[in-house]
Amino acid sequence: MPQLETFYEVMRRQGITRRSFLKYCSLTAAALGLGPTYAPQIAHAMETKQRTPVLWLHGLECTCCSESFIRSAHPLVKDVVLSMISLDYDDTLMASAGHQAEAILEETIQKYKGEYILAVEGNPPLNEDGMFCIVGGKPFLDQLKHAAKDAKAVIAWGSCASWGCVQAARPNPTQAVPIHKVITDKPIIKVPGCPPIAEVMTGVITYMLTFGKLPELDRQGRPKMFYGQRIHDKCYRRPHFDAGQFVEEWDDEGARKGYCLYKVGCKGPTTYNACSTVRWNEGVSFPIQAGHGCIGCSEDGFWDKGSFYERLSNIPQFGIEKNADEIGTAVAGAVGTAIAAHAAVSAVKRATAKGDQE
Amino acid sequence: MSDELKQRKQTAVYVYEAPLRLWHWVTVFSIVTLCVTGYFIGSPLPSQPGEAIDNYLMGYIRFAHFTAGYILAIGFIGRIYWAFVGNSHARELFLPPFFSRKWWKEIGHELRWYLFLEKTPRKYIGHNPLAQLAMFFFFVLGNTFMILTGFALYGEGLGAGSWADQWFGWIIPMMGQSQDVHTWHHLGMWYLITFVMIHVYVAIREDIMSRQSLISTMVGGWRMFKDDRPD
Ligand code: HEM
Ligand code: HEM
Ligand code: SF4
Ligand code: SF4
């Protein structure tokens, strides 16, 4: 493998002072939940390790992940990580374009076989041999498979790459699938969200670049440090939930007092993400703080679960879309009526049959 | 009808042993608690007045749900153990004789009895075949489903890596995601409520109309037959 600069060298070349660099290291340690003692370790790794090349591909997507990423809270984080990445390939952020860009992609794959990290934003549509998403004149599906073949690890950015998201929602005409349906032989780190939080994205990538290994993942391949808890577990409105104080209508007293949004369909209790701790836009706020329930954007198939204002899923198998309580009360009502009728007939039968009893 | 009292001999058989009866009523208590508290977890009561710090209503409701959930689950494990060490009637719940033609024919007979097409029901020392079938599909499977999904949800609250997450957490991705587990767990409640409605109605009806005792059997263990005619 050819000699590469270290992370530190890259940063210095970008005009980042040593002081800022050390600040960045402690910030990263904190963001990763590692504690202050890890800051020197991160600094050391960054000073001595060769930077890892990153390829960033775009499939069927809306670029919201990139948009989120470049708005990372600490400007340094963005500059640093971005400079580490855009050096290689990211067709929306890199300077080059066209054939030149495709050539860089090819070059990186050849030069760093088995060494580079592949980050995928969006997903491949399979219908019509992948013709619904063309990159550089070829189906994205082919580019994805090609780039994944020699990657060390793969990052699935956002709900698109992780679960399928809106383009895979019913009826999914392009047959868009999450990337793990296409890449089956590489470790995949899912970073879901629509989009994922900027600090989560930079945190994951920094962890991988500094420690040279994957962060600890949960059953579904999400980094535990950011997706280990539900929104509900760390929500600042949780005391109102436990107390039984809810917003019943959008303009009621409860809404003004900042009560829990459970009854207006908050998906916080079923959504794994870091919004209630890291928050959005430099930690300013997050949906629940703004008074709207979580819509579960980082969960599998969140478009297809019915209204954003109902906590439970609709059950389309029952003809018209119904929720569990509607089905339940209908069945229980029918059974109750049947029981009453049956009891009445039984009573009549018994009364008329009294004579033949022993 | 003559006024003289007719002589009637009643036979009694000891059917349900004490642990089984105790389990039945403990299960009744926990399922009723689980349904009521579960319903209010899904559709909470109107907002409580005052400050959050002075209230803990959802907390108490959820605590009651989880406690009853533990009792139900531990009881069910005990019931499975009893199927091994108890008398033969203790096994009926778990092992309906699906491959017996006679059993299926008797289900037909029982169905006709409920459709008022048979004049008299048959006598059974244990469960009648239709009851056995319903108890297996509605109760054994339904209850198992509720315990599995319940503890999977419980594991989410205890947190990643907790015992409940390690044992039951795999259920969540298997069913899609957390929201799907909530939905099915909720629907499962209605499945069990349907069973309980029919079960209680039938228990009372048969206690009156069949040729044998029912409710007192589940209380005292003895099955009384009201007549001496065969079968
Ligand atoms: C939540 C409510 C209830 C549940 C889940 C339930 C469940 C069960 C189960 C699983 C059995 C089978 C016992 C075994 O084989 O081990 C059973 C039997 C029985 N239950 Fe219940 N039960 C409920 C409520 C009641 C109530 C309220 C009554 C009384 C009116 C009742 C009366 C009986 C009787 C009489 C039997 C014995 C039936 C027979 O001898 O064939 N149950 N029940
Ligand atoms: C007969 C058995 C049961 C019934 C009828 C029942 C019913 C329910 C219902 C209706 C809900 C509300 C679901 C929703 O709308 O989100 C619920 C939630 C829940 N149940 Fe059960 N349940 C049963 C057994 C269990 C068991 C054995 C456990 C295990 C401890 C359990 C744990 C839970 C948990 C953790 C929740 C979620 C609570 C929350 O979101 O705050 N359940 N249950
Ligand atoms: S607002 Fe949503 S996440 Fe917050 S406590 Fe209520 S239900 Fe949970
Ligand atoms: S609060 Fe919920 S819907 Fe909003 S961004 Fe976070 S996970 Fe997505």
Image (cartoon, coloured by chain):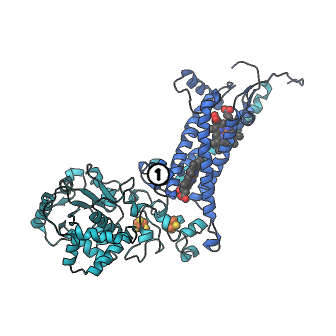
Chain colours: A cyan, B blue
Residue B96 x %, y %: 56, 29
Horizontal placement of B225 versus A27: left or right? right
Residue B7 x %, y %: 85, 21
The image shows residue B105, relative to residue A174, as above or below, that is above
Residue A58 x %, y %: 23, 63
Q: Callout 1: few (<14), some (14-19), or many (20+) C-alpha neighbours within 10 Å?
A: some
Q: Quadrant of the C terminus of chain B?
A: top right
How many numbered discs? 1
**Looking at the image, which is closer to me, A22 or B186?**
A22
**Looking at the image, which is closer to me, B88 or B43?**
B88
Residue A86: quadrant of the picture: bottom left
Horizontal placement of A99 versus B174: left or right? left
Q: Can residue A166 be seen in this view?
A: no
At x 37%, y 77%, the residue is A282
Is label 1 in a helix, a strand or a loop? loop
Look at mark 1 in the image and give the residue it sits on: A315
Residue A52 x %, y %: 22, 64
The image shows residue A167, relative to residue A355, as above or below, that is below
Residue B60: quadrant of the picture: bottom right
Horizontal placement of A99 versus A58: left or right? left
Q: In which quarter of the image is the N terminus of chain B?
A: top right
| Tag 1 subunit | A
Residue at the extreme right of the image, as rendered: B4
Q: Which amino acid does label 1 sit on?
A: Ile
Q: Can residue A303 be seen in this view?
A: yes
**Looking at the image, which is closer to me, B149 or B169?**
B169
Q: Is mark 1 within 8 Å of ligand 2?
A: no
